[in-house]
């Protein structure tokens, strides 16, 4: 791993905030696999409820929305990755806007603590929810460029928190010289993520519904919306690779950039893919009153290809095969009374 300042040493302290979550847990595992020996993993969930726990890592249960906890967590850190936020699929972020907005406290305290601690680099996980919703009213949406966040009309709650936190990152670089890096995630999915309970996103929710249909023989599932809404979905391995490349690019300091796939599909097409993987077909019952988000959203990857010479490459079918297989194992484990990954409200 290299940066605009120096090569990260394997014995540098690295802080991953939100390490008990889906993306944070995958990032911790990747850092450990690469030989980093001083990883501090922090999440407000009890450690026993974390999605993944990597051996040899300092795991701390701590709420980083509290200033003193942020100061403690950032102490001695050369790199800080902020993936801590209250979030989930549309069922969560449309119903709990205040909780989503309160995540601004984590970034506010953590970036200040990182700067005071002398951190070399700070990463913020933003979201495609920052984009102007007026540009996302048609399923046949044009792909969103980074400049499309302004004039600002982000998704209420979650999107506005992400946009404001991006601004914090940009100003800490401009005024205080803290090297910050910002990635706008587009629907990250994969194994070791939330798959039931209300916070799961569409790939996991649809996989679970097909697995339940296959198991019970009740071949009908509920689809939120009319099934025509469109999205692109980015596989977790591509996301982690992208975080590393963005964090260590001298050309992407304080510069928000898309991190997503350009493979646009409708929700109906996503169901088609999962049906093919599951080996069954189901009747689709459309709930037009359920949360469904914007009509269409896709990632324009012109900028990331130009600057990094790279973009997410996993196809949706490839990623969904791995995701479905993992959720099916989780489903069977839960039926057998074993402990499984979940997100507590």
Image (tube, grey):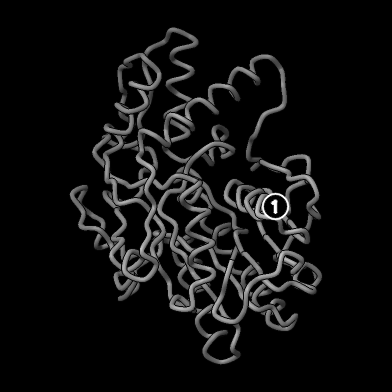
Residue 166 position in % (x across, y down): 49, 73
Instruction: Judge left or right: residue 295 versus residue 41.
Output: left
Q: Is residue 332 left or right of residue 267?
A: right
Residue at the extreme top: 217
What quarter of the picture does the N terminus occupy? Answer: bottom right
Q: Position of residue 236 (x, y in %)?
A: 50, 46
Q: Position of residue 4 (x, y in %)?
A: 54, 80
Is residue 50 placed above or below 67 in the rendered structure? above
Q: Residue 10's spot in the image, x, y percent?
A: 72, 64
Residue at screen point 78% across, 40% down = 48
Q: Is residue 122 above or below residue 324?
A: below
Quadrant of the drawing holding the C terminus: top right
Task: Say above or below: 153 vs 266.
Answer: below
Q: Residue at x 45, y 44 (%)?
A: 235
Q: Give the residue furthest to the bottom.
A: 175
- Residue position marked by numbered label 1 in the rendering: 32
**183 relative to 317, above or below:** below
Task: Answer with left or right where residue 289 lies relative to residue 334.
Answer: left
Alpha-carbon neighbours of circle 1 within 10 Å: few (<14), some, or many (≥20)? Answer: some
Q: Is residue 279 left or right of residue 183?
A: left
Res 149 quadrant in image: bottom left
Task: State how many labels appear.
Answer: 1
In depth, the one of 315 and 272 nearer the eye is 315
Q: Residue at x 28, y 65 (%)?
A: 302
Residue pictured at 24% horizontal, 38% vertical: 228
Dot 1 falls on a residue whose secondary structure is helix
């Amino acid at each position: 791993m290299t940066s605009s300042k120096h090569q990260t040493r394997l014995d540098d302290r690295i802080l991953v905030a939100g390490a008990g979550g889906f993306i944070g847990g995958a990032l911790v595992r990747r850092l450990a696999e690469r030989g980093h020996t001083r990883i501090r993993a922090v999440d407000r969930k009890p450690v026993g409820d974390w999605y993944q726990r990597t051996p040899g890592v300092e795991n701390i249960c701590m709420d980083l929305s509290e200033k003193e906890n942020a100061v403690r967590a950032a102490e001695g850190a050369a790199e800080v990755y902020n993936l801590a936020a209250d979030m989930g699929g549309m069922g969560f972020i449309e119903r709990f806007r205040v909780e989503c907005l309160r995540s601004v406290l984590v970034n506010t305290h953590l970036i200040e603590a990182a700067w005071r601690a002398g951190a070399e680099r700070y990463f913020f996980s933003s979201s495609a929810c920052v984009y102007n919703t007026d540009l996302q009213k048609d399923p046949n949406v044009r792909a969103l460029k980074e400049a499309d966040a302004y004039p600002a009309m982000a998704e209420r709650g979650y999107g506005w928190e992400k946009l404001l936190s991006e601004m914090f990152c940009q100003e800490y670089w401009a005024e205080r010289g803290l090297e910050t890096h910002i990635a706008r995630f587009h629907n990250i999915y994969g194994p070791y993520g939330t798959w039931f309970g209300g916070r799961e996103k569409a790939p996991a929710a649809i996989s679970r519904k097909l697995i339940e249909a296959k198991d019970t023989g009740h071949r009908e599932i509920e689809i939120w919306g009319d099934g025509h809404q469109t999205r692109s979905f980015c596989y977790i391995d591509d996301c982690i690779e992208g975080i590393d490349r963005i964090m260590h690019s001298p050309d992407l300091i304080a510069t928000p950039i898309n991190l997503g796939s350009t493979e646009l599909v409708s929700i109906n097409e996503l169901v088609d893919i999962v049906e093919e993987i599951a080996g069954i077909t189901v009747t689709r019952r459309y709930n037009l009153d359920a949360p469904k988000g914007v009509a269409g959203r896709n990632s324009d990857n012109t900028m990331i290809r130009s600057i990094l010479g790279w973009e997410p490459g996993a196809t949706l079918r490839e990623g969904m095969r791995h995701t479905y297989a993992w959720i099916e194992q989780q489903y069977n484990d839960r039926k057998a009374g074993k402990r499984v990954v979940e997100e507590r409200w």
